[in-house]
Image: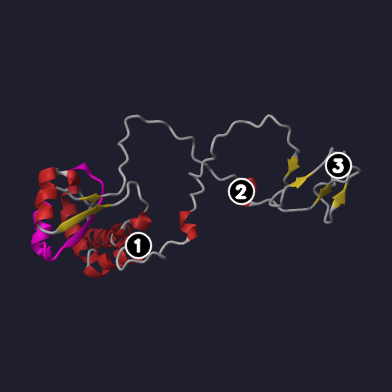
Amino acid sequence: MERKFLKFSKHFVHHARCSPARPFLLLLDNLDSHLSFEVLDYFKDNGVTVLSFPPHCSHKLQPLDRSVYGQLKKFINRACDSWMSNKKRPLTIYDIPSIWAIALPLATTPLNIKSGFRVTGIYRLNTEIFQDVDFRPFFVTDRPVPTESNPLPQTPTHTFGSSTSVTIGPISPIPPGIASNFDEPVAGTSGICITKSFPTPEDVRPFQKAGPRKSNNRSRKKKPTSILQIRL
């Protein structure tokens, strides 16, 4: 793998015309083959600074995911439909290269590639590309933090549908049929106040949540984003 990446490095330097007088910045992911001393020495001699992406970053920081892969999938589907319409037979694995040769040039245009860097705020640099809402956790993976149970007694709360929970005192009996048919606030003998509300879709069918995280000692060690350059 390292030998293949060294071959890519020479291809990049040749076509980008990198040199110490004309330095370049190359953005890569955190594959171990990118950390080869031979590759980093070659890049340093040719004026290329390598910057790695953070591990497990979302699509919002992936230029190819934002502007190239979606177009590539669309053109592959169109090429497959056209191929089967003309050939009148199912696709096989031996037909994939011809499909790929049609779709790849249509998706990897300079305009699409540049758009990926623009929408991620990488180039031109845009520090305002992400809003506060983009940093909120996803609902499914927003697992609650395990905490120790509080031994102190708590005042009970009741929540009806999508209404705000209300604090109540000692619960007094309410005649049957009132809780589901009232339109105005109903007061019990102990001062309890209940307001009518309607159930939400989540009340009827709760959204699924991811289970607790599993500890896996064999997982790959996480690496922070770094500038991969040898210092003498």
- Taking the spot 48% from the left edge, 44% from the top edge, the residue there is 141
Mark 2 or 3: in front is 2
Between disc 2 and disc 1, the foreground one is 1
Q: Residue at x 50, y 58 (%)?
A: 133
Residue that badge 3 annotates? 176
* Chain part drawn in magenta: 8-33
Residue 20 image position (x, y, % from top left): 11, 62
Determine crowd level at label 1: few under 14, some 14-19, many 20+ residues with C-alpha closer than 10 A. many
Q: Is residue 138 left or right of residue 75?
A: right
Q: Is residue 34 above or below residue 154?
A: below
Question: Which residue is at the front of the view, 104 or 158?
Answer: 158
Residue occupied by mark 2: 202
Q: Nearer the viewer, residue 56 or 95?
A: 56
Tell me if residue 23 is in the magenta stretch.
yes
Which residue carries the number 1 mark? 120
Earlier residue among tags 2 and 1: 1
- Side of 106 relative to 186 (left or right): left
